Image: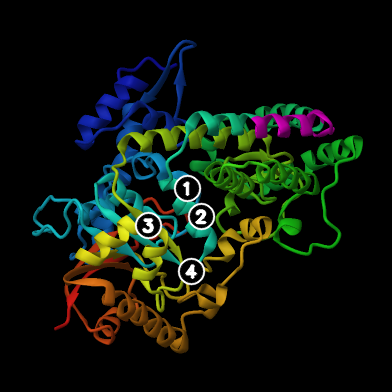
Amino acid sequence: MPQTKSLLTIKEASKWASDFLKRDISESNISYLVQYGKVRKYNDGNSVFVDIDDLKKYYESYYGWREMNYKKRLGNDLNWALSFDYLREKDTTKHVHRLHPYKGKFIPQLVQYFIDDHTDDFKNDVYFKVGDIILDPFSGSGTTLVQAKEMGMHSIGIDISYFNCMIAETKLLDYDFLSLENEIKKVKQAIAGYETDSNITAFENELLACMTDFNNKYFPSPEFKYKVQRKQINEEKYSAEKEKEFLRTYNDLVKKYGIELNHLFAKNFLDKWYIKNVKKEIDFAFEQIKKIKDARNKKILAVILSRTIRSCRATTHSDLATLKEPQVTTYYCWKHKKICKPIFSIKTWFDRYTTDTLYRLKTFAKLKTDSYYAVIPADSRTVDIFKEIEKQNKNFYEILRKQKIKGIFTSPPYVGQIDYHEQHAYAYDLFGFERRDELEIGPLYKGQGMEARTSYVEGIAKVLLNCRKFLADDFDVFLVANDKYNLYPVIAKQSGMRIINQFKRPVLNRTERNKSPYSEIIFHLKNGK
C-alpha cells in the first residue's frame, strides 16, 4: 500500500464525501464505489482504503454536474426539488413499496409531496387533508393507496389488470402474522423436501464451486472491474473467450447430473422462460399454496411466489427488466463482470422473499392508519365507483356518498411504452387470471403513431370524464405524465377540466440501460367550469 496521506478508510471517506457534497454519503455508498470498480481499493491486510483524489474525481464528474447537465438537456424550467436526489434506494422502496417488482411506477415520495400538508416555493397550497378520499384510476401496484393509508386518507384504486389489483391489495391487507408465518414455514419445508428428492442441489453445488474458482482466476473483483472502467482490457474479446472456455465445464456437469434444460415445445410463457426443472418446482410450490384456507395468507404467498419466479426466469441479469432470449447456459454477465448462470431452483429466492415480505408487512403495519381503502379490478372509463364501493364496504360507501372523492393522484400509462399485462405474463400463466390486454390504454404493442395517440387521448379523457362524476366540485387532479407529444392540454379540454399548473421533474435512478436525462410533468387540473 502506498504511503500517502490521501488514503482514507471507508468510514473516513464517508465523512469526507458528506462534507464535500454537503449531503449524507454513507459507508455503504463508498463500499459500492469500491465494489464496482468506480474507485481503486487499497488494502494493508486489515483495513480497506480509498484515495481521496479518486473520490473527488468521481464525484466531480457525476454528482456535481448532474443537475447542470439535466437542465442543459431538458431546460431551466426543470424543478430539481422534485428529483428527490437526496434519497437512497431503500427510501424510495420503503416497506411494502417493494413487495413485488412493477415496471413504470412512481416513487412514494412524489405522492406524499402533493398530498401532504406542507407548502414550499413550488407547492404553495394544501390540496388534501386527513379523512379525504383520493382516487387512483390507474392504480397499478398501489403506490398512491399505500401512501394514503399511511397518511390517514381514504383511497380507491382502479386497474384493468387483475394481477395488479392483487399486488395492491396484499400491500394493504391486515394479517395475522403468527398464522402467516406458520403457512410460510409449511410451504418452505415442502419446497426444501422437493429439492432433496432431486439432484439439483448436488449439481448446483458443484457448478458453483467450479464457477467460483474460474471467476476468482479470470475475473478477480474488484481488480477486473477497475481495469474495465479504465479501458485497460478489451472486455468484449476477453469475456467471449472465457465464456466459451467455461461452457465446456458447464456442459459436462449438465450431462453428468442429467439436468433437463429445455421444453421441446413451449406452449406458454412459463414453458419458454423457465428451465424445465424450475417449472416443475414452481408448479409444486403453487399446489402447496392453493391448499391454504385463509384467503389473505393465500394471496400474499401467491405474490411471494410470483416475485420469486420473476427472479428465476432463464435470462441474463442484464436483460431481467426487458427479456430478449432464454438463457439456459452459463454466460458472461455484463452487469456483474464475471461468469454467471441461469436459475435452477426457486428455493433460495423463495426463502429470501418470504423473509423480506414479512419484514415489509410488519413495518407497514406499524405505520398505516385505520382509513378505508378499496381496490377495484375494472375499466376506469366505465366503472360505477359508488356501486363497487357499496358492494365492498358499506361504511366506506356512506363516507363516499356523503363527501365524495376530493381528487385524483395517478400516473396514466405513457403512450406506447409498456404492455402492462405482458410484464407479468408469468403470473397470468401460473394463476390463470383473465388477461384484458385489449382494454389497456396506450400499450406498447399499439406504438406511438398518430392513430395510437388519438386513441390514447380518447381513452384518458374517457377515464377523467367518468371519474369526475364521483368527484367533489372543488376537486384537484394530479396526473404524472411524460407528455412528449403535448397530448394533455387536449385531454384536459375533452374531459371538461383545465390545467392550472404543471411541475416538470427530472427522473433519476432509472433501471433501464438508457441513462439519458429524462423528465416527466405533473399536471394539476381543476374543474373547467
Q: Is residue 71 above or below residue 21?
A: below
**Circle 3 is placed at which residue position?**
393
**Circle 1 is placed at which residue position?**
170
Q: Earlier in the sequence, mark 3 or mark 1?
A: 1
Find out whether the residues at labels 1 and 2 contact each other: C-beta distance under 8 Å.
yes
Distance of label 3 from label 2 (alpha carbons):
18 Å
Q: Which secondary structure dominates the residues rendered in magenta?
A: helix
Distance of label 4 from label 1 (alpha carbons):
17 Å
Q: Is residue 243 above or below residue 325?
A: above
Q: Is residue 421 above or below residue 30?
A: below
At label 2, counting other C-alpha atoms closer than 10 Å, the crowd grade (few under 14, some 14-19, many 20 or more) is: many
Tell me the number on the disc at residue 97.
none
Q: Residue at x 31, y 55 (%)?
A: 395
Q: Earlier in the sequence, mark 3 or mark 4?
A: 4
Find out whether the residues at labels 4 and 1 contact each other: C-beta distance under 8 Å.
no
Image quarter of the C terminus: bottom left
Q: Is residue 21 above or below residue 515?
A: above
Tell me the number on the disc at residue 166.
2
User: What percent of the width, then of the height, locates residue 368?
Assistant: 31, 41
Q: SS class of the residue under badge 4?
A: loop
Q: Residue 191 magenta-drawn?
A: yes
Tell me the number on the disc at residue 160.
4
User: What percent of the width, then of the height, locates residue 370?
Assistant: 29, 44
Image quarter of the N terminus: top left
Please state which amino acid type lies under the numbered disc 2: Met
User: Quarter of the image holding residue 49?
Assistant: top left
At label 4, counting other C-alpha atoms closer than 10 Å, the crowd grade (few under 14, some 14-19, many 20 or more) is: many
* Magenta range: 186-202
Q: SS class of the residue under badge 2?
A: helix
User: What percent of the width, then of the height, locates residue 258?
Assistant: 90, 39
At label 3, counting other C-alpha atoms closer than 10 Å, the crowd grade (few under 14, some 14-19, many 20 or more) is: few
